[in-house]
Image (cartoon, rainbow, N blue to C red):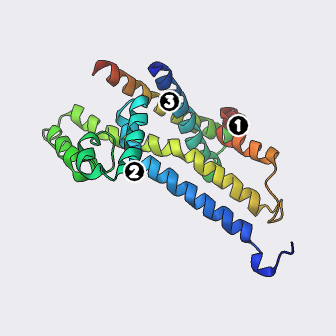
Amino acid sequence: MRRAHRLATAAWSVLAAGAGLGFIARDLLDLPAGLVALAWTAGALAALALALRGARRETSG
Amino acid sequence: MRCGSGERGQATVEWVGLLLGVALAFGALVGGVRGAAKEESATGLGEALAQRITCAARDGCAAGGGERAVGGGVRGGRRSGVRREGHGERHAGRSPRSSRAAAAPTMARGADAAQHAWIVCFAYRRWRYDVEGRRTPYQAVPVRETVRIVNDCLNPWSFFFG
């Protein structure tokens, strides 16, 4: 159950961070489609990295 | 029932009030359990939330709750500076590794802000819909349009190919 919670939180974080940066790039900055996709990917990867680091810290400590 | 001129715009005022109330409640929730969300597991968030609610009901958080709230509370060590002092000691002798560790909270804060930007997307799209004037003030937003807004704001496909 705990692992499912963590997984769901990580999945949502990735989606939300990607959507957040994507929104900023697409709607606020009005960037072209390629850069919007790049911004979404960057946001998702950043959230994924943070989630992985948190999980690693939790297992080690 | 006849709608007098004094009642004009009443629904809008009520909706704005409701929206403000929900935003306030959500803000309090986020502020109250933010530390728990960052530093503890998902179950820790639930515990911190339950603790905040019971403390508020008993009005007894100020003395006893502070200790527990170091990881997850508003009134705990985070605000009183206990945590910050410890942090300062840890980074007193700066090494490349410690500077990287110091940059980590900034990155986490940025990611945190990005994670919450999707909510602004809803508000922005809704505002754009109103500005475009596709409905009269008394008309509700069609379900189809609402679904489209949600899809535009959350579906990764719309960011890549939309």
Which label is found at residue B158? 1
Q: Quadrant for the C terminus of chain B, please.
A: top right
Distance between the alpha carbons at the discs numbered 3 and 2: 28 Å
Q: Amino acid at mark 1?
A: Ser
In depth, the one of B40 and B1 nearer the eye is: B1
Judge the density around disc 1: few (<14), some (14-19), many (≥20) Cα neighbours within 10 Å.
some
* Residue B60 % position (x, y): 30, 50
- Same subunit: marks 2 and 1: yes
Kindly indicate whether the residue at mark 1 contacts the one at mark 2 (C-beta within 8 angstroms).
no
Marks 1 and 3, how far apart at CA: 22 Å
| Relative to A16, B161 lies left or right | right
Residue A1 location (% of width, % of height): 48, 19
At 79% from the left edge and 66% from the top edge, which residue is drawn?
B137
**Percent coordinates x, y for residue B48 in the rendering:** 38, 39
User: N-terminal of the two: label 2 or label 1?
Assistant: 2
Residue A37 is tagged as none
Residue at 52% x, 36% y is A43
In front here: B126 or B91?
A: B126
Residue, x 50% and y 21% (percent of image)? A4
Q: Please give the chain letter of the residue carrying mark 1.
A: B
The residue at which mark 2 appears reads as B57
- Under mark 3, the amino acid is Thr
Residue under label 3: A9
Q: Vertical placement of B66 versus A55: above or below?
A: below
